[in-house]
Image (cartoon, rainbow, N blue to C red):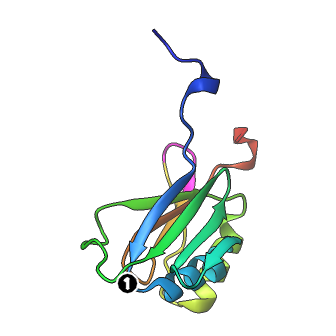
Amino acid sequence: MTQSASSRPSLFAVELRTTRWEELVEWYRSRLALPVLVRVLDDRYALLAAGDTRLAILGRDAAAAGGNRWSLAFEVHDLEAAHARLLAADPTVAAPAAHAEGFRELRVADPDGNQIRLFAWPLDHGH
């Protein structure tokens, strides 16, 4: 039995647990320009808009170890503007690279060492 597209689960949020809650909320807000939808200081919880999904940042006294176990990929429409914003805060951020599949991508790490990929398709790609 196959599910119709409307009955399939859709990703609501990616949850990121950290001991550096304030720093991570500010990094995603200022460096990636993700709007903060909800911020609950007492619970150390923030929900940020990230296109069709959301990023939840949860402050925890003991976060999961190993920031390189996963990455977040964000599709952006203006990769050059995203690169300029990151470069202004960190002059060591590498320039975007082109991939054989037709998209351009840049990689950075957030303050906890989590890998972040930002990518853009060519304007004529239809995305």
Helix, strand or loop status at disc 1: loop
Q: Residue at x 64, y 49 (%)?
A: 121
Establish if 69 lies above or below 66: above
Q: Is residue 67 left or right of residue 11?
A: left
Q: Residues within 10 Å of mark 1 (few under 14, many from 20)?
A: some
Quadrant, the N terminus: top left
Q: Is residue 116 left or right of residue 53?
A: left
Q: Is residue 78 left or right of residue 67?
A: right
Q: Is residue 103 magenta?
A: yes
Residue designated by label 1 = 19
Establish if 79 lies above or below 62: above
Give the image location of residue 85, x and y in percent. Answer: 66, 81
Specify the quadrant of the image occupied by residue 70.
bottom left
Give the image location of residue 97, x and y in percent. Answer: 51, 63
| The magenta segment | 100-104
Q: Camera-side residue: 30 or 7? A: 7
Q: Is residue 23 magenta?
A: no
Quadrant, the C terminus: top right
Q: Residue at x 56, y 63 (%)?
A: 55
**Residue type, label 1:** Thr
Q: Camera-side residue: 84 or 102? A: 84
Q: Main secondary structure of the magenta part?
A: loop
